[in-house]
Image: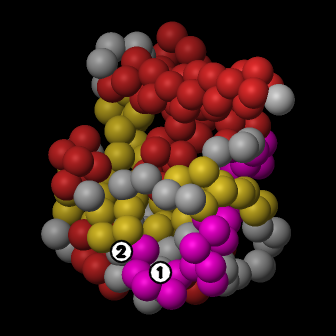
Amino acid sequence: MAFLNSVRFLAARLHRDRCLLLILAVAHGLALGQGGVALERQVKAAYLCKFAGFVEWPEGSFARSDSPLLIGVAGAEALAAELEQSMAGHAVNGHALQVRRLKRGEGPAGLHILFAGSALERNELQDLLAAARGQAILTISDAEEAQAMGSVIRFLVVDERLRFEVALKAAALSRLRISARMLAAAYKVRQVNS
């Protein structure tokens, strides 16, 4: 039994380190163009896992101290599949990470993180972000107009590298505290949504 627990611990550690290595590789030289869409999707999944550890949700955001941290994904089926695979068995601050695929028209209630993909139609994206506004949900998107619609984080590709921008006003409206370490890693930090 102790051997099995050791193997599980090592597997979890290797996976966690793999996520960090993916982020570091892209941030420090590995261009997305070399790995294509699959690499970009893997890096987004790794960022979503890491973001969970750098955000503080307000009291009452979790029903219990061991309630799962729910990441909802809309408009990005391949990313949802990547997240399910890469997050299996992982936890952040005692909360197991779980993925929920949102169906068209489904709201973000109960989520802690919402990824709204650029494949969503403009009005779907706007409705989803509006439904999340004011709730303690870290909203993330790769759509160009997402921050103007109230998203806290937006992924963008700069010089063939995946980066992210943070809108502090949107985070404040959601009552989320983002660590200084995460803000320091951001490509851009905006005081207001634009």
Q: Which residues are magenta?
A: 57-84
Residue 153, percent across and down?
Answer: 39, 59
Proximity of marks 1 and 2: CB atoms separated by less than 8 Å: yes
Residue 129, percent across and down?
Answer: 53, 76
Q: Residue at x 16, y 69 (%)?
A: 191
* Neighbourhood count class around disc 2 (C-alpha, 10 Å): few under 14, some 14–19, many 20 upward: some
Residue 31, percent across and down?
Answer: 41, 16
* Neighbourhood count class around disc 1 (C-alpha, 10 Å): few under 14, some 14–19, many 20 upward: many
Whichever of callouts 1 and 2 sits on the residue coming sooner in the sequence is: 1
Dividing the picture into quadrants, the one containing residue 111 is bottom right
Q: Secondary structure at mark 2?
A: loop
Residue matched to label 1? 136
Residue 149, percent across and down?
Answer: 42, 74
Residue 176's disc number: 2
Dividing the picture into quadrants, the one containing residue 123 is bottom right
Q: Secondary structure at mark 1?
A: loop
**15 on left or right of 136:** right
Q: Nearer the viewer, residue 58 or 34?
A: 58
Question: Residue 75: within the magenta?
Answer: yes
User: What amino acid is at disc 2?
Assistant: Leu
Q: Residue at x 66, y 71 (%)?
A: 67
**118 on left or right of 173:** right
Residue 22 visible at all:
yes
User: What amino acid is at disc 1?
Assistant: Ala
